[in-house]
Image (tube, grey):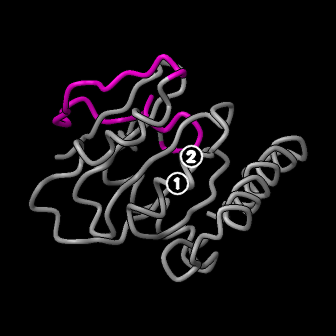
Amino acid sequence: MNHQTCFSMEQQKVRYEMRNEIETILKESHIDRTKFQEASKKYYDKIIRTLYYTYCDYKKYPAIQAAYMWTRFRDHLKMTELIKTDWDDWEQYIGKLDMLIPENAPTKCYYLLVDGGWVYEGILSEIKKVLLKYPISMDDFYLFPKDYSWLINHCDDGGCMYRVWK
């Protein structure tokens, strides 16, 4: 799957607006690119495919899509309670990401997948800096370790986030 070919021209425009917005955040917030950066496009397909096949019901939904991926999650996944936002509490909401990361998490570097299919990697403190400035209108995002052992989903439609694992 070439993630670039899955999008119409209008979708491509929106995708690049998302990427450009994140690039603006990185520059304006002076984010250290050794601590948060776009993942190598060479690995996009592998990252998205591995995530999809780990958490989504690929037999029922064989087409891999980053948008609304949470609607394709397998039924048997374990899940934390929802953490909700009313959108006015975005700073506190993003601060609660720490509550969803398992205490024994072996990694300090995570992937961040945003709607539009852009994949980033970095440490949690820098990811949170980006998400604090992340326009709420940019929809869902997924945060997960490089071993894919769990996944945090922020769902724009429900104004909530939660962690799932097998």
Residue numbers of the magenta segment: 62-88
Q: Residue furthest left?
A: 104
> Given contact means CB atoms under 8 Å apart, are the residues at marks 2 and 1 in contact?
yes
3D distance between C-alphas at marks 2 and 1: 8 Å
Q: Secondary structure at mark 2?
A: loop
Picture disc at residue 66: 2
In percent of the image, x 59 and y 39: which residue is there? 67
Q: Is residue 110 left or right of residue 47?
A: left
Main secondary structure type of the part rendered in magenta: loop
Q: Residues within 10 Å of mark 2 (few under 14, many from 20)?
A: many
Q: Is residue 125 above or below residue 18?
A: below
Three-letter code, disc 2: Ala
Q: Residue 60 occupies which quadrant of the picture?
A: top left
- Pointer 1: what residue? 113
Q: Is residue 121 magenta?
A: no
Q: Position of residue 96 (x, y in %)?
A: 31, 39
Q: Nearer the viewer, mark 2 or mark 1?
A: 1
Which sits earlier in the primary sequence, circle 2 or circle 1? 2
**Crowdedness of circle 1 by 10 Å Cα count: few (<14), some, many (20+)?**
many
Across and down, in percent, residue 10 comes to 89, 41
User: Magenta segment: does it hold 65?
Assistant: yes
Residue at the image point whose x is 61% and y is 63% from the top: 1
Camera-nearest residue between 139 and 57: 139
Relative to 29, 151 lies left or right: left
Q: On the picture, is 38 further left or further right than 49?
A: right
Given the image, on which type of amino acid does mark 1 rest? Leu
Label 1 sits on a secondary structure element that is strand
Where is 54 relative to 152, above or below?
below
